Image: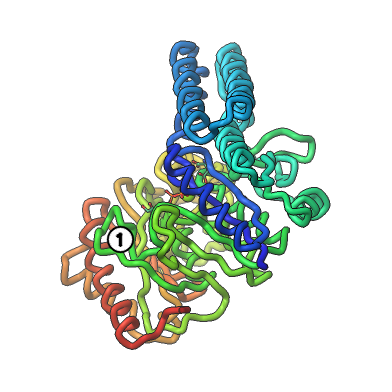
């Protein structure tokens, strides 16, 4: 018997048919004698609809948010009708959904009165997606005679008040999970937990950032001391590239925690970047698998360094970023300019995705998400006003329509010439590289190119990854099975 934490993403609970598959999968693990904690996302598209309802309410568009509310009611009612046959059980589930949606409508009305959707209210509005989907799944499991119970995670995942991207307070969360949730699991109850949401110590709802249900699942896996975390999604595993960017993408049988950390940070949407944080120290294996193709073993993510000869394992990209360059001859020898720039950026609420400095110390550049770039530029200019006046700094320039491309693979460490191969290949394709950075872990190299070059750059580097993955397959290495 093993203790498993399983997370099902938006597409996996996106329709009654998909939910039926999820129920079968949970039932299968329970029948095999495993203890299972389940974490679910909102039904696909629902979080976006809730965001749109917040925007409509803030604009005073009552018709707009009411029609979203009605569409959400219809979507969940149809799932309940399809999955629960017993009239009394079905009506009980419909009643719970109706009650939540009435709350959603009320909250939208409150936003309309305020004329603004603060981050705090937005988080409360976004929470309805997971609160609804988890109730549908739990009710459907109970209707099949399984001992499941819907659980709202805000009672267990306690966070700071950084609404929209809240950070868990580890000790508080762990003690609540160990004291409140673990006994239920041990008593044979299968909790169906809401992904994505938490609450501040005084009970105000927060969210962990878009795609954050993966992170929620990892927190529960760690605190429940699970033997394995399984992320069920809509692709066969972690792939050599985003299959939507390059259809040749292949599933990687094994990646290390470190590699997945880089891949997720640099744009592989398949996992939230924080997912491995909670499980890395406890060495809990993570498996990424396809709800719709359960026969496929998926990707195993673990601690050991790869058994593979592969140098470049995968290529990722991030769109919608902008690059800021601070330059000036007078910067040489003026200490603290970079530090002040990065602090001003952080104070403007932006995360830095990549930093690169020229060796002459006459300029450095960094990238932030596109929508925040003008605010960051203004904040940096204010911070460096004196140096700009004194002409130590010539300018703070903003470049849009660029992308970050990253090649990832732990085998790069200690393999000379990888960067050379990457950049000469781009040179041959006449792709202009605007800036370069190597991760300190030496398992990734990131660089910036114009947005127009994205597909060409990814596909030529992806060919390198595919070559090495194929070598591994032929040589029988790189697979954990
Ligand atoms: P879920 O709703 O299950 O959390 P997501 O949509 O968040 O699923 O993530 C899965 C998607 O991530 C896939 O459908 C795929 O299009 C995308 N993706 C991007 N890069 C990769 C990659 N390297 N490997 C696998 N999938 C990727
Ligand atoms: N439902 C949330 C989102 O769409 C969280 C998640 O699916 O992981 O971002
Ligand atoms: Mg996701």
- Dividing the picture into quarters, in which one does residue 315 lie? bottom left
In this rendering, is residue 53 above or below 472?
above
Q: Is residue 185 visible?
A: yes
For the point 58% across and 59% down, the residue is 29
Quadrant housing residue 197? top right
Q: Quadrant of the N terminus?
A: bottom right
In front: 60, or 363? Answer: 60
Return the x and y of residue 23 as percentages of the image width and height.
Answer: 53, 47
Which residue is pictured at 41% across the width and 57% down the height? 268
Residue bearing mark 1? 434
Nearer to the camera, 164 or 254: 254
Which residue is more in the foreground, 57 or 43?
43
Residue at 74 percent across and 50 percent down: it is 169
| Residue 386 visible in the displayed image | no
User: Is 109 located above or below residue 439 in the figure?
Assistant: above
Percent position of residue 78, x then y = 46, 28
Q: Is residue 59 above or below residue 77?
A: above
């Amino acid at each position: 018997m093993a203790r498993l934490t399983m997370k099902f993403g938006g597409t996996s609970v996106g329709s009654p048919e998909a939910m039926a598959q999820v129920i079968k999968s949970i039932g299968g693990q329970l029948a095999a004698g495993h203890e299972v904690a389940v974490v679910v996302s909102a039904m696909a598209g629902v979080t976006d609809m809730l965001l749109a309802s917040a925007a409509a309410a803030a604009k005073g568009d009552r018709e707009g948010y009411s029609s979203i509310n009605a569409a959400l009611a219809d979507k969940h009612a149809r799932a309940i009708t399809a999955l629960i046959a017993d009239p009394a059980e079905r009506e009980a589930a419909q009643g719970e959904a109706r009650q939540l949606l009435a709350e959603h409508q009320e909250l939208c009305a409150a936003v309309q009165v305020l004329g603004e959707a603060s981050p705090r209210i937005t988080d409360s509005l976004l929470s309805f997606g997971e609160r609804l989907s988890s109730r549908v799944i739990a009710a459907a499991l109970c209707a099949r005679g399984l001992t499941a119970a819907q659980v709202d995670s805000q009672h267990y995942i306690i966070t700071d008040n950084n609404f929209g991207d809240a950070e868990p307070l580890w000790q508080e969360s762990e003690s609540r999970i160990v004291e409140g949730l673990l006994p239920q699991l041990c008593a044979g109850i299968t909790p169906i937990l809401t992904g994505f949401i938490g609450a501040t110590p005084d009970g105000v709802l927060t969210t962990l950032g878009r795609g954050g249900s993966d992170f929620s699942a990892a927190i529960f896996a760690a605190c429940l001391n699970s033997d394995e975390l399984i992320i069920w999604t809509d692709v066969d595993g972690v792939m050599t590239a985003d299959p939507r960017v390059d259809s040749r993408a292949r599933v990687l049988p094994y990646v290390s925690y470190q590699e997945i950390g880089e891949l997720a940070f640099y744009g592989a949407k398949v996992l939230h970047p924080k997912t491995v944080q909670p499980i890395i120290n406890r060495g809990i294996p993570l498996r990424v698998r396809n709800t719709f193709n359960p026969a496929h073993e998926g990707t195993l993510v673990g601690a050991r360094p790869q058994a593979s000869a592969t140098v470049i394992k995968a290529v990722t990209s991030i769109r919608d970023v902008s690059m800021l360059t601070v330059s000036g001859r007078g910067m040489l020898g003026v200490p603290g300019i970079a530090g002040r720039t990065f602090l001003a950026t952080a104070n403007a609420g932006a995360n830095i995705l990549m930093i690169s400095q020229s060796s002459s110390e006459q300029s450095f550049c960094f990238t932030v998400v596109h929508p925040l770039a003008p605010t960051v530029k203004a904040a940096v200019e204010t911070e460096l006003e004196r140096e700009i006046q004194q002409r130590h700094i010539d300018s703070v320039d903003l470049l849009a329509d660029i992308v970050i491309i990253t090649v990832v693979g732990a085998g790069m460490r200690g393999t000379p010439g990888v960067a050379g191969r990457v950049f000469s290949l781009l040179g041959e394709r006449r792709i202009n590289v605007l800036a370069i950075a190597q991760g300190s872990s030496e398992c990734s190299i990131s660089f910036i190119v114009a947005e127009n070059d994205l597909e060409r750059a990814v596909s030529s580097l992806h060919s390198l990854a595919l070559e090495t993955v194929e070598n591994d397959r032929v040589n029988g290495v790189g697979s954990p099975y």
